């Protein structure tokens, strides 16, 4: 006989079938017995309830007969006119004689009494009458029953009103014995009735019982007597009186089949069923187990080789012998094996491709332990990775490691779905490497933990270039001091810190006295050397937290932070002025320099950076008016004319915008090669009756602060497109650049409004460039990019104005849907310096790489124009070609060049 290993499928199947058969036999038999018992119990309950109702009905009939008998006795007494006698004694003697004549008569009452209306017992007869009379004498309300302890007998009281002659109305009380005869008359077939009082049996329907017999009253359920089981119910004979005797109804329970015979029958039936089931399932289960074994062996063969060999296919064919679910599993397994085989081939090709990539592809767990590292990682770092042991943090620069750990923790905990950033990697034999990384979280190989997969790309060269461009954008090319942009940024931060700490901040304007004479007498080279030397001297005199910046020309600005009081600023500025007065030796010539300085204090003189600079500038001019070579604080000035002027302009500006007094002017943009006009920029201009032409640098920030920049921009836009419509009628095709503020850009209906205005005038958005500053473009990059994509999709061109002065990175510029960049005038003015030329050349290369056209602003001479053209700048704009003109003059300007 073939044997099977305990772990084999067939052994497990047979063992489980046997266990199932035993379980069914045992618990099935128990269930059948329980069901049979429940059926018998339900039948017994129904019979007991039926017997109860029968007894209740019979008892009612019996009580009715008792009442009729009592009434007959009463009628007989009245008929005999016993109480018509003149003497009561004679009446009682006749009554006693009457009851004596009834003794032994069937259906008559052996004992009784007569009571008056107040309950006094007047007469008693029978063996229990005297004792009963003593118990109830003087009781107005009689009980329904009476128990004679002497005779251990219970009686039901049957009463009837009786006329007592001269004594008036009374009651006839008759004692009906509740004996075995009464119980036997009440008991139906298969029922034993017991009369019980205080758990002691007083009588039985089946004759006399042991006087010491006891029962449990108020119990309904199964009882046994004389080896007979019965179902007991309790009947209250006399209402709800708990002390009254009770009738126990015991209905005999009969079982058609005995329990041993039933158990034997059930066991035989289950055994027959088990045998039939065993014979019918045995061969079929063996075939199933054999096919499953073929499927298992095929799986083992594929796991070992990952190839669909001929023996493996034969095994799968045997497993698919019958058209059932197991055959479907075999076919699915074949399809899965084929997919795995294809995947293995693709995976091998993928690994070969990874070997070719310069980028490092890695997979790490939540603790940073390497799970996988491509050869590109080794080429990046020069480190051989021991997967499962080495940590990625070992290759990260110590200064970048804490932030990188924090970022990875947020990724593995689900706080972030992906990571994009930069960090430095340490190389074994080279300098630190800047890389850009992209990581995502995924399911680890153990399926229970999160792993992180990512790519790291070497960006060292582009990062250094970007850093160099950023430095040049934020620093003066000559003195290496911070420029306006960096100064204003630091000043903004200083004001926020001072506001929190309650400190003061000083902003000073510094202007060299008579510096023009140095340039005129000794040349610009000497002047530049003097500015560099002065910048070094002034910077050395400041504290570590202060900032010195070059504002332009011979002007400097200084930022003093963390001042406890205004006088501290005066002390620092005095030392600052002393360093300025030191003699300087330039090319063998000694120069004695003096400076005029104006200082404004936050928060005493102004609340914003712009206002502080304006106040310091006023104080500096006041110092020059006082004879130069001096320091003047805003608080030293005798009047505030400038403030009154600013307030006046602010009030007039609001009225001018509402009255649509601002006008659009145009400045042409020319092709750098042909010098032909290829476009223009729309500029806002305002002429006030009192102050004349107000600079846009003055009224545009005011409009932003007043919340009127949207209305101002809309007025300039409408005037611009109306001018374009006139030019179109004259046959002039020109691309126009229109400046857009941040508030305008984020109006929800901005794009739709522009398109509606153009459609009304039959103009195309393809002829318009919308200019936004680089700072606006980067302020909310995600929403800005979304809006700019919407505009470019509508046909508008997007120009980044003041390019290079903001904080955008190359990756942000790559994502921005711009079509053109405008090189800021601050860079154009430095183009004749070596670093300035390199900077513009780098900007042109970056723009070319991103397929962006370039426009240079502030071109004021032919030498600058020619150099910019040689550097690859495509379009030029500036005073060298034309100053801004009003709409009429510009139209004439265009017509003149059209005819030419």
Image (cartoon, rainbow, N blue to C red):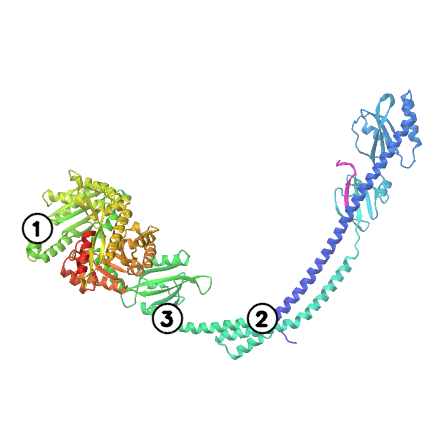
Distance in Å between CA atoms under marks 1 and 2 = 103 Å
Kindly state the secondary structure of the residue where label 3 is placed: helix
Q: How crowded is mark 2: few (under 14 residues within 10 Å), some or many (20 or more)?
A: some
**In the visual, does 292 lie left or right of 272?**
left
State the residue lying farthest toward the front.
729
Whichever of callouts 1 and 2 sits on the residue coming sooner in the sequence is 2
In the image, 770 versus 132, the foreground residue is 770
Considering the image in quadrants, where does the N terminus appear?
Answer: bottom right
Q: Quadrant of residue 106?
A: top right
Residue located beneath label 1 in the image: 592
Q: Give the range drawn in magenta.
A: 232-245
155 left or right of 10 in image:
right
Q: Position of residue 346 (x, y in %)?
A: 42, 72
Instruction: Where is residue 784? Give x, y as percent.
Output: 32, 55
Q: Residue placed at 44% from the left, 63% from the top?
A: 444
**Residue 307 shown left or right of residue 537 in the figure:** right
According to the image, label 2 marks what residue?
326
Residue at point 89%, 36% (across, down): 107
């Amino acid at each position: 006989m073939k044997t099977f290993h305990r772990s084999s499928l067939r052994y497990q199947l047979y063992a489980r079938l046997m266990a199932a058969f035993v379980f069914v036999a045992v618990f099935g038999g128990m269930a059948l017995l329980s069901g049979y018992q429940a059926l018998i119990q339900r039948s017994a309950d129904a019979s007991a309830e039926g017997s109860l109702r029968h007894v209740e009905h019979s008892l009612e009939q019996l009580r009715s007969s008792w009442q009729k008998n009592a009434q007959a006795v009463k009628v007989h007494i009245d008929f005999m006119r016993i109480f018509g006698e003149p003497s009561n004694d004679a009446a009682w003697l006749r009554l006693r004689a009457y009851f004596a004549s009834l003794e032994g008569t069937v259906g008559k009452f052996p004992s009784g009494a007569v009571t008056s209306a107040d309950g006094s017992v007047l007469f008693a007869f029978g063996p229990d009458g005297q004792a009963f009379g003593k118990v109830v004498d003087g009781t107005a309300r009689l009980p329904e029953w009476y128990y004679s302890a002497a005779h251990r007998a219970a009686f039901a009281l049957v009463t009837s009103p009786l006329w007592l002659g001269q004594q008036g109305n009374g009651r006839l009380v008759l004692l009906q014995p509740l004996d075995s005869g009464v119980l036997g008359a009440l008991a139906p077939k298969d029922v034993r009735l017991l009369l019980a009082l205080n758990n002691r049996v007083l009588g039985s329907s089946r004759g006399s019982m042991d006087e010491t017999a006891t029962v449990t009253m108020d119990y309904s359920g199964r009882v046994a007597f004389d080896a007979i089981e019965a179902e007991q119910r309790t009947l209250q004979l006399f209402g709800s009186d708990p002390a009254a005797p009770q009738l126990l109804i015991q209905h005999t329970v009969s079982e058609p089949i005995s329990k041993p015979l039933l158990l034997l029958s059930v066991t035989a039936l289950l055994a027959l069923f088990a045998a039939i089931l065993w014979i019918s399932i045995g061969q079929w289960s063996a075939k199933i187990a054999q096919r499953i074994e073929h499927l298992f062996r095929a799986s083992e063969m594929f796991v070992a080789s990952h190839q669909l060999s001929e023996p493996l296919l034969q095994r799968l064919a045997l497993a698919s012998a019958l058209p059932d679910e197991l055959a479907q599993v075999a076919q699915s397994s074949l399809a899965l094996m084929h997919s795995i085989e294809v995947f293995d081939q693709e995976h091998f090709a993928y690994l070969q491709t990874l070997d070719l990539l310069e980028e490092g592809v890695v997979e790490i767990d939540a603790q940073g332990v390497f799970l996988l590292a491509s050869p590109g990682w080794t080429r990046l770092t020069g480190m051989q990775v021991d997967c499962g042991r080495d940590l990625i943090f070992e290759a990260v620069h110590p200064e970048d490691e804490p932030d990188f750990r924090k970022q990875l923790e947020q990724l593995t905990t689900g706080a972030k779905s992906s990571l994009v950033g930069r960090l430095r990697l340490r190389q074994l034999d080279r300098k630190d490497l800047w890389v850009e990384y992209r990581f995502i979280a995924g399911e680890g190989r153990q399926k229970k933990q999160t792993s992180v997969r990512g790519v790291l790309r070497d960006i060292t060269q582009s990062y250094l270039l970007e850093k160099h461009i950023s430095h040049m954008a934020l620093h003066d090319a000559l003195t290496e001091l911070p420029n306006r942009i960096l100064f204003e940024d630091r000043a903004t931060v200083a004001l926020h810190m001072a506001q929190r700490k309650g400190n003061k901040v000083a902003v000073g304007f510094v202007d060299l006295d008579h510096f023009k004479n140095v340039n005129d007498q000794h040349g610009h080279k000497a002047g530049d050397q003097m500015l560099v030397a002065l910048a070094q001297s002034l910077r050395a005199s400041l504290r570590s937290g202060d900032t010195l910046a070059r504002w332009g020309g011979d002007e400097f600005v200084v930022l003093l932070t963390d001042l406890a009081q205004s006088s501290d600023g005066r002390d620092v500025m005095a030392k600052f002025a002393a360093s300025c007065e030191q003699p300087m030796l330039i090319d063998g010539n000694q120069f004695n320099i003096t400076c005029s300085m104006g200082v404004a204090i936050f928060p005493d003189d102004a609340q914003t950076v712009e206002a502080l600079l304006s106040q310091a500038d006023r104080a500096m001019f006041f110092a020059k008016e006082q004879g130069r070579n001096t320091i003047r604080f805003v608080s030293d000035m005798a009047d505030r004319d400038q403030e009154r002027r600013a307030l006046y302009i602010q009030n007039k500006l609001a009225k001018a915008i509402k009255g649509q007094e601002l006008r659009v002017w145009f400045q042409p943009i020319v092709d750098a090669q042909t010098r032909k006009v290829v476009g223009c920029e729309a500029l806002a201009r305002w002429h006030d009756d009192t102050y004349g032409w107000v600079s846009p640098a003055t009224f545009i920030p005011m409009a932003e602060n007043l919340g009127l920049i949207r209305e101002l921009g809309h007025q300039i836009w409408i005037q611009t497109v109306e001018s374009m419509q006139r030019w179109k009628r004259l046959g002039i095709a020109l691309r126009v650049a229109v400046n857009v503020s941040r508030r305008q850009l984020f109006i929800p209906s901005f794009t739709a409004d522009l398109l509606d205005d153009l459609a009304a005038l039959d103009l195309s958005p393809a002829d318009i460039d919308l200019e936004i500053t680089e700072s606006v473009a980067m302020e909310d990059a995600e929403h800005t990019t979304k809006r700019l994509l919407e505009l470019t999709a509508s046909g508008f061109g997007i120009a980044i104005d003041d390019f290079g002065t903001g904080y955008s990175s190359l990756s942000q510029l790559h994502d921005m849907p711009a079509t053109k960049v405008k090189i800021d005038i601050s860079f154009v003015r430095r183009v004749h310096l070596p670093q300035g030329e390199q900077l513009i050349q780098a900007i042109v290369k970056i723009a070319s790489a991103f397929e962006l056209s370039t426009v240079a602003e502030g071109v004021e001479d032919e030498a600058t124009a020619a150099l910019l053209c040689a550097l690859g700048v495509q379009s030029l704009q500036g005073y060298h070609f034309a100053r801004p003109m009003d709409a009429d003059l510009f139209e004439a300007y265009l017509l003149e060049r059209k005819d030419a």
